[in-house]
Image: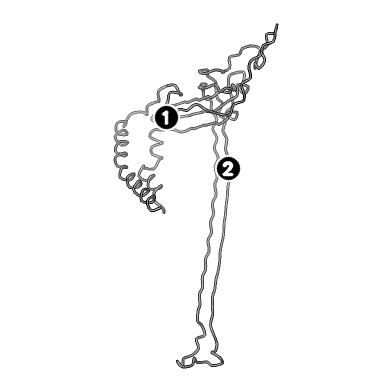
Amino acid sequence: MKLKALLRQSSAIMLILSLPVLGGCAALDRIKQVGEQPALSSVDNPTARPGYKPVQMPMPTIQPAAYNANSLWRNGSRAFFKDQRAHQVGDILTVKVNFTDKANIANQTQRSRTNAEDSGIDNFFGRTKVPLINSAVPTRIFTADSNASSEGKGSVTRQEALTTNVAGVVTQVLPNGNLVIEGKQEIRVNFEVRELIVAGVVRPEDIESDNTIDSNKIAQARIAYGGRGQITDVQQPRYGQQVLDVLLPF
């Protein structure tokens, strides 16, 4: 246990000592971008990004395709005529993001406790004085009082809404036919870049005839909306303050 504590302390010390170096590199990058607009990310292949991992989910047993004699219909086919909806890697579909979240939570706790201890004697075998020492019998031998109280209140009020459209690309077709999609949109206004990222797994049946799909029909949905630039930079605390908020125990 002591060894683990020492390792944690040494790791924290090394992190604190490395902050000036990391901060200096970040500061140099920011100095180079003074007066410049934030650069947009390049359009690239999502599967070629560092850290990309194909999605793996439980799959049913693959059923072999069966064809009926003198019939144009194939068992297992989803449609008689071919449509233009996304169904293979590289196809594009539009995700209609409609996200609304509202929560109100309130908690209140009150607790109090009062203790009193009082012990003593009035006489010592009928005498008001203690023999031998000839002193008065103490009426109070032990007295203790304690009071404790605590009160806690907490409340959370959150309301978020996001309505927009973003085009996504099919990056993978799972063995059961479900599609893994990912879409990213960047909009730069003056010196601020707004980013919208949508990813998840969709069923081909949920894709509408106009090649769109609602975000609430995306399984394992990952929706991120944020930004970067001068406004976002001012709204964030400095890196030193963020590290101290993590390390300081009070």
Choose between 203 and 125: the one closer to the eye: 125
Q: Position of residue 140 (x, y in %)?
A: 51, 82
Marks 2 and 1, the one that precedes in the sequence: 2
In the rendered structure, the answer to whether residue 145 lies left or right of residue 63 reads: left
In this view, the residue in front, 13 or 248, is 13
Q: Quadrant of the C terminus?
A: bottom left
Residue at x 66%, y 12% (from the top left corner): 80
Give the class, few, some or many, for how many residues have Cα within 10 Å of label 1's Cα (few <14, many ≥20).
Answer: many
The residue wearing badge 1 is 193
Q: Position of residue 42 (x, y in %)?
A: 40, 23
Q: Is residue 122 left or right of residue 233?
A: right
Q: Crowding near pointer 2: few (<14 within 10 Å), some, many (20+)? A: few
Q: Quadrant of residue 45?
A: top left
Residue 189 x, y percent position in the rendering: 42, 28
**Residue 180 percent across, percent down from the top left:** 54, 24
Q: Secondary structure at mark 1?
A: strand
Label 2 – label 1 distance at C-alpha = 29 Å
Number of numbered discs: 2
As helix, strand or loop, the secondary structure at mark 2 comes to strand
Report the residue marked by disc 2: 103
- As shown in the figure, which amino acid type bears the numbered disc 1? Val
The circle drawn on residue 76 is none
